[in-house]
């Protein structure tokens, strides 16, 4: 038995007699809390799977692959020549993107940010 962790969700894969059963990535991505869209990309940015607000969004796919290329070119003296990122988070006021690399694929999830009542517009009576 092997365990695959994508975005801190442990998914167990059970070995059959001949091969490991593959779980549809879309089904896993749909279980991520507050997820409103996802992309699964190849290393060169081709969309393999997508859903929600990011369904077939090639513009976001291009932005993500450009960001990854840029992050891999960051000062090698400071980070070391073989030290690459494992996860990138991009935060906006009402949503955020999480980008992870695993098994030569790029996983991108767009999630809602819920603001607690005390930080939003309160009404004092």
Image: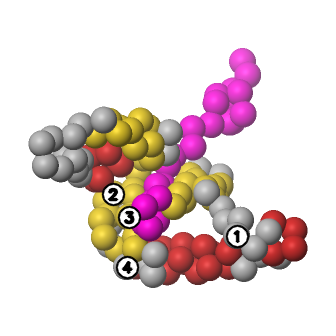
* Secondary structure under the numbered disc 3 in the rendered image: strand
For the record, the magenta segment spans 102-125
Residue under label 3:
40
* Secondary structure under the numbered disc 2 in the rendered image: strand
Label 1 vs label 4, nearer the camera = 1
Residue 59 visible in the picture:
no
Q: Residue at x 31, y 59 (%)?
A: 51
| Residue 117 place in picture, x, y as percent | 64, 28
Q: Residues within 10 Å of mark 2 (few under 14, many from 20)?
A: some
Residue 52 disc label: 2
Q: Residue at x 57, y 38 (%)?
A: 114
Q: Give the Cα distance between marks 2 and 1.
A: 34 Å
Residue 82 disc label: 1
Label 2 vs label 1, nearer the camera = 1
Residue 46 disc label: 4
The quarter holding residue 48 reads bottom left
Q: Residue at x 41, y 51 (%)?
A: 36
First of labels 2, 3 by sequence position: 3
**Can you say whether 61 is above or below 26 in the image?**
below
First of labels 3, 4 by sequence position: 3
**Can you say whether 72 is above or below 100 in the image?**
below
Q: Pointers 4 and 2 in contact (CB under 8 A)?
A: no
First of labels 2, 1 by sequence position: 2
Colouring used for the render? secondary structure
- Pick out the residue farthest to the front: 17
First of labels 4, 2 by sequence position: 4
Q: Give the Cα distance between marks 2 and 3.
A: 12 Å
In the figure, is residue 10 to the left or right of 97? left
């Amino acid at each position: 038995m092997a365990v695959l962790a994508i975005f801190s969700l442990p998914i167990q894969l059970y070995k059959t007699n001949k091969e490991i059963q593959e779980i549809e990535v879309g089904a896993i991505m749909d279980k991520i809390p507050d997820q409103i869209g996802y992309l699964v990309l190849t290393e060169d940015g081709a969309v393999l799977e997508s859903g929600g607000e990011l369904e077939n969004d090639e513009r976001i796919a291009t932005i993500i692959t450009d960001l990854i290329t840029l992050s891999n070119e960051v000062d090698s003296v400071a980070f070391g020549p073989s030290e690459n990122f494992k996860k990138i988070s991009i935060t906006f006021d009402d949503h955020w993107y999480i980008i992870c690399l695993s098994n030569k694929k790029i996983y991108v999830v767009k999630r809602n940010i819920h603001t607690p009542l005390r930080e939003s517009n309160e009404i004092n009576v």
